[in-house]
Amino acid sequence: MEVKSAYIHIPFCVRICTYCDFNKYFIQNQPVDQYLDCLITEMNQSEVRTLDTVFVGGGTPTALSHEQLEKLLAAITDIFEIKGEFSFEANPDELTLDKVQLLKDYGVNRLSMGVQTFKPELLEILGRSHQTEDIYNAVTNARKVGIPSISLDLMYHLPKQTLEDFKDSLEKALSMDIDHISSYGLILEPKTQFYNMYRKGQLKIPNEDIGEEMYEYLLNRMNQSELHQYEISNFGKAGHESEHNKVYWKNEGYYGFGAGASGYVNGERYNNVNPVNHYIKKIQNNERPILDSTYPTENEQMEEEMFLGLRMNQGVSRERFYQKFNKTVDDVYSEAIQDLLQRELILDNGGYISLTERGKVIGNLVFESFLLNV
Ligand code: SF4
């Protein structure tokens, strides 16, 4: 199948958040201009020229200076014809009016803002660079220049966060008539500042039940809003779902450009090299900048099809499964499906298999049932 999506990685941040295990570096003293030149070379060397979706993420792409951002935007739009969604990740304190105008001028039509919480004390604990008022300013600026789709990320199950805190952040986001919300529970990742604090007994994470309670609240509250759920952690108004992320969940192909970016093209899953200096060296030596690459087996592809597809409210398409594997879902998974139906963790409407509300809360347990060869 032709690949029509691309992820572009900008691995720089102005401050490193305490919980973050993404592929990112503190921007100061990094060879940012050299990195951009190499990124542009990599994009130029790819065979694709027309894309349906582009997602520029990080790190934080808006950590770039105005000139660097303009160079990047000019290159992306020069190399690719972008027919649909052109998304940018942004930090609220970096969305000044002139930067957001620049994004709009180059055709960016969706912003995904890392808000996480509106509560100042929690922003501080998370080590975020922005303040609560930056969120309001960023949304106002984005609306002023006419960005058509604005998404906010909100986190729950945070240290010291109460259910009331989470409710309050959600209400504040909804009160701005936001088009889309992504909401994820905190995962304590090794090698993060949070993890070290936790090990030393300096950080208390609320117990699992509170995380589940927050998620259940999120589902109920969003049910009463204009933003409908379409994926376990994603909610959007009609016409504002993330088309780029749906490519991942439908287990379709995408290019990955930049240090540490991943791609899935013609059956090959690859990861680019990291850190930034290694990536730069590979590009300068005219080598493909990959760290590793695999061709998932058919069983692995079927597992991915189930795990990823079940994340969406629509679920796994029986037809798409058959088209891809020339086998029905029941040929492979009839036992697991019968068991999960009985336990009321999945639904089956004949065309799609999807999670029930309870299934969404304990999604990982459901996904395990679709592992083959264990
Ligand atoms: S801004 Fe995002 S990528 Fe950067 S450190 Fe914070 S969470 Fe990580």
Image (cartoon, grey):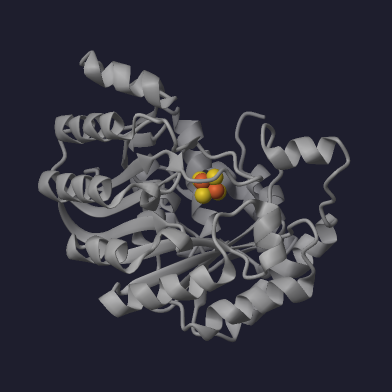
Any part of residue 146 in sight? no
Question: Of residues 350 and 292, which is closer to you in this image?
Answer: 292
Q: Left or right: 207 with respect to 329?
A: right
Q: Is residue 172 above or below residue 13?
A: below
As drawn, the residue found furthest toward the right would be 201
Number of numbered discs on residues: 0
Tell me which corner region of the image, top left, top right, bottom left or bottom right, holds residue 214.
Answer: bottom right
Quadrant housing residue 373: top right
Assign the C terminus to one quadrant of the image.
Answer: top right
298 w.r.t. 342: above or below: above
Q: Position of residue 303 (x, y in %)?
A: 53, 40
> Residue 282 appears at what percent x and percent y?
30, 17
Q: Could you say which is closer to the camera, residue 219 or residue 135?
A: 135
Residue at 67% x, 67% y: name it.
Answer: 120
Residue 285 on image: x %, y %:
23, 13
Outermost residue toward the front in this view: 29
- Residue at x-position 64% and y-position 81%: 221
Quick one: which residue is furthest to the top in this view? 285
Q: Quadrant of the N terminus?
A: top left
Task: Name the side, left or right, on which 127 lies relative to 153.
Answer: right
Against 1, residue 228 (above or below) is below
